[in-house]
Image (spheres, rainbow, N blue to C red):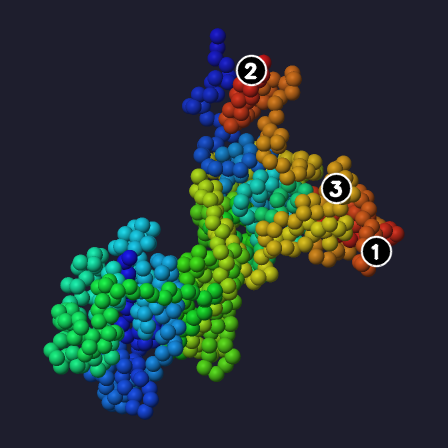
Amino acid sequence: MLWACLHIPDFSLQLLQRAAAPVEPVIVSSGGNRPMVLSCDAQARSHGIAPGMKVSAAVALAPDLVERHRDAAGERHALERIAGWAGQFSSMVSLSPPDALLLEVEGSLRLFGGLRQIMLRLSGGLNELGYTGAAAVTPTPTAARLLALAGLQSTVTDLAGLESALSGLPLALLDQPAETVRMLALAGVHTVGACFALPRDGLARRFGQSLVDELDRALAKLPDPRRPYEPPARYRARLALPAPVHETEPLLFAAKRLILELAGFLRAKQAGVTRLKLTLCHEDRRPTVVRLSFSAPSRDPQRILHLLRERLARLELPQRVEAILLESEEARSLDSRNLSLFPEDNVPEEERSAVLDHLRARLGVDAVYSIASHADHRPELAWRACQIGVRGEPGAAEPGVVEYRAGGRPERPLWLLDQPRRLQLEDEAPALDGPLTLLAGPERIESGWWDGNDVARDYFIAANGQGRRFWIFRERGTASTWFLQGIFA
Amino acid sequence: MPPSLDLVLQNPAVWRGDQYAKVAVESIPSGFDELDAQLPGGGWPRAALTELLASQPGIGELRLLAPALAHLSREQKWLALIGPPYRPYAPGFESLGVDLARLVVVSTRSQAETFWAAERCLRSGACAAVLAWPGPGSERVLRRLQLAAEQGKSFGVLFGPTRNAAAPSPAPLRIQLSAARGRLGLQILKRRGGGWAPPLSLALDAQRFAHPLTPTLSRPSPYPLPQAGEGPFCLLGKGSIARDLRVSRLQRLQHGVA
């Protein structure tokens, strides 16, 4: 087993800075009666603010300071989102709250092409999500966590090297009560290595079994089971913006963080989504909801961003946005597909639906459709607008019609007018840009008495002097009421 | 024995007025032999923009494309109709042999939207053919479309009125259409390889398109064998090189049969 630990230092601060780089100095405070500075960014530090200071003292140093209370539940939630994203690198991801993740990477080495590659992709991906972290790899999870907490990007692959790698670490990193660490310090024991050198029984008697157990787990002398993180069926993440924004670009930047996280989450599940909901929360207005839908399950972050950009560009925001919330429907498994021998012959299904989604995003959902024949004799009912790519019944006609058509299918126009247009008469004959000559007909269509839209018409193919051909009809029983219904383009 | 006229004409130094440079372009058979003979590559150019300028809409500009569209609808790609002037009628397209499951209709509200959608579809590589009905477009817009068609390897067709013929256009193929005595008259205004093209007159009778959706192999060959007594030489008279090549193929076929 080989465990990688991803530790994100100053997690609460990084959560704030993730959506956008704040302009003013930022601190995270503990809240309560005597709030303390828990962490502060580089700007605040340059004003002389340091963790552990009282908030009132910090405000005195930097009056334009932005203070945010620590949100433990939000941190836990964010850590789970990162764990869901990290699922694409390993099937065994475990949370190590408050600010670290453990991944078993030995099983993934071959897939990703070695430890170096997998760690590069992990840290690169983490940066894209808006976090910076330290990662350490050791054979035991406890040791990996200790090294990562110390900020050491070390890699130890054999058990023999573990003890020396850990010996220099300060005792404060151990998951032990502060009192234990203080007493050990009073006894002159400051490092993990010095602890290893002490007699085990005495150590256990004075400081409890848990200290000895933790050291043993770090050196793989005791089993160290970890609970794997199980991602939920849907993705749901909220990202607060450090300052409310009105422009599209900062919104997209923040949304990109979440969409990349979603893409990793979906890759871990080998799935895609067809519907996404982005909620833009305002200060005191109803939130604006942007819904994205894809014709085929997708998890390509570029494509999702592309659609989102299209939608945000034509969105009127009533007010500035202070937080965004991305929710997915239940993930659907992506169909695996065969690759073609000739790449240019085969456009992947996802690409074919991407262009349709893009057209829909800009022109509206109803503007992009397909047509299908429908089993009806009445021309205006013999077609239907339908979903793209759905093959209707071939021929789509009643059995009797097929037989009749086999003898010689009557010609049908390519364009149909939405409403038949009454034709002018010239010398008792129909005319459209000149007198019309009847080329074929009549074809009698009499149908629909059962649903009230009954028609009784004689159809003709007619041409005018300029060579245009039309599909016209005459109501049965009338001699001179002509209508234009179609054009043979 | 004096060399036959045929041999003299095959000399590459002899240039004939109706000849055009051979360009290797991927093409789609138009289904009309007379037209294929005049088009570089022997058919509609794939990965390029084609302009069809009709004197009147409704003279057969779509039926001219029907064999090619029916052929392209067998690919796993879309056939996009962008901003059509009327409602496309499903039974009509079906009777031309177009697979409706591949047909995508995009209705647009403005010329800008039509151009945008056409460019997006052409560039995507997911559309086998993109048919668009925009108004007159500037040369810059058309150039963008041409580049998009090249990139997406898509057969782009723009329909427009004849008066657009005077405007410069980067489309490599421009054809002016007119109706003449129940037939469709074609005048190639511009083609790759240049040269003057004789005016064509095609019969767009309904019967020739009334083939149902059949696989390519069972369709009749676009090159019919000459009837008995009709020698290949009667075709040789005024043929372009492309036609001559085909005749020599026919001769080989006939020898093979005999």
Marks 3/1 same chain:
yes
Q: Disc 3 or 1, which lies upstream in sequence?
A: 3
Work out which quarter of the rendered image holds the C terminus of chain B and state it.
Answer: top right
Tag 1 secondary structure: loop
User: Depth check: B218 or A172 in front?
Assistant: A172
As rendered, which of A339 and B252 lies closer to the eye?
A339
SS assignment at label 3: helix
In the image: residue A110, left or right of residue A319 = left
Q: Amino acid at mark 2?
A: His
Between marks 3 and 2 in the image, the one whose residue lies nearer the viewer: 3
Label 3 to label 2: alpha-carbon separation: 43 Å
Which residue bears the numbered disc 2?
Answer: B255
Q: What residue do we see at 49% from left, 34% from top?
A: B41
In the image, taking residue B167 as reference, residue A129 lies left or right, namely: left
Asked if the residue under mark 1 is in contact with the one under mark 2, i.e. CB atoms within 8 Å, the reply is no
Residue B49 in view here: no
Q: Who is closer to the viewer here, B61 or A213?
A: A213
- Residue linked to disc 3: A402
In the image, residue A419 sits, relative to residue B126, either above or below, namely below
Q: Mark 3 near mark 1, Cβ–Cβ under 8 Å?
A: no
Determine contact: label 3, label 2, CB under 8 Å: no
Q: Position of residue A37 (x, y in %)?
A: 27, 84
Q: Which residue occupies the extreme bottom position in the image? A: A33
Residue B119 on image: x %, y %: 49, 53
User: Residue A411 lies in what quarter of the image?
Assistant: top right
Given the image, on which type of amino acid does mark 3 rest? Answer: Val
B87 is higher (above) or lower (below) than A309: above
- Residue B204 position, x and y percent, is 66, 37
Residue labelled with disc 1:
A449
